[in-house]
Amino acid sequence: MTATTREETPVVLEGGGVELRMKEAGGGLSVAFIHLPRGTDMGPALKGMPGDLCQCPHWGFLLSGRIRMRTASGEETYEAGQAYYWAPGHAPEAMEDTDAVEFSPTAEFGEVIDHIKAQSG
């Protein structure tokens, strides 16, 4: 893959207004287009993972919205227009309707997505 659009990227997780589209980008990384409606707290879906937190690193850009990221060492808020790196050990909460584009290791992100699907299934 050399390029993709949101519309060309398959939906891998959906429900409650949350939409995650993901496609392998090459080099062991995947690109994801993520929509989280205001009030979405991913913490409950991450229960059972080490520390009850996402263990996959993400590099991305917030297109719109605002996210509060909880980690073992505290909280930080990210806003539209910011590029970010989230190290393993985090749980996001959407403070506003949020859209982001992320790049993540395919295998690690797949494990997190499988865990979330199992929690909701």
Image: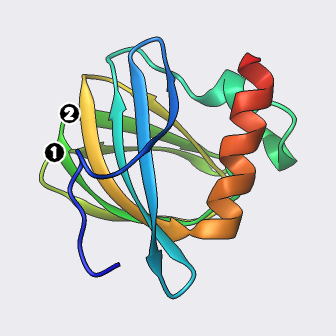
- Three-letter amino acid code of the residue under disc 2: Gly
Is residue 72 visible in the rendered structure shown here? no
Tally the numbered discs: 2
Lower sequence index among marks 1 and 2? 2
Describe residue 121's horizontal placement relative to residue 14 as left or right: right
Q: Residue at label 2?
A: 65
Can residue 14 be seen here? The reply is yes
Dot 2 alpha-carbon crowd within 10 angstroms: few under 14, some 14 to 19, many 20 or more? many
Residue that numbered label 1 is attached to:
80
Compared with residue 18, is residue 23 higher up or lower down, i.e. above or below?
below
Residue 11 at x, y percent in the picture: 44, 38
The residue at 69%/22% (across/down) is 44
Q: Observer-nearest residue: 67 or 114?
A: 114
Q: Position of residue 90 (x, y in %)?
A: 61, 48
Q: How is the image coloured?
A: rainbow
What residue occupies the far bottom of the structure in this picture?
27
Work out whether 4 lies above or below 2: above
Q: Is residue 7 left or right of residue 9?
A: left
For label 1, the SS is loop
Labelled pair 1, 2 in contact (Cβ < 8 Å) = yes
Q: Amino acid at mark 1?
A: Ala
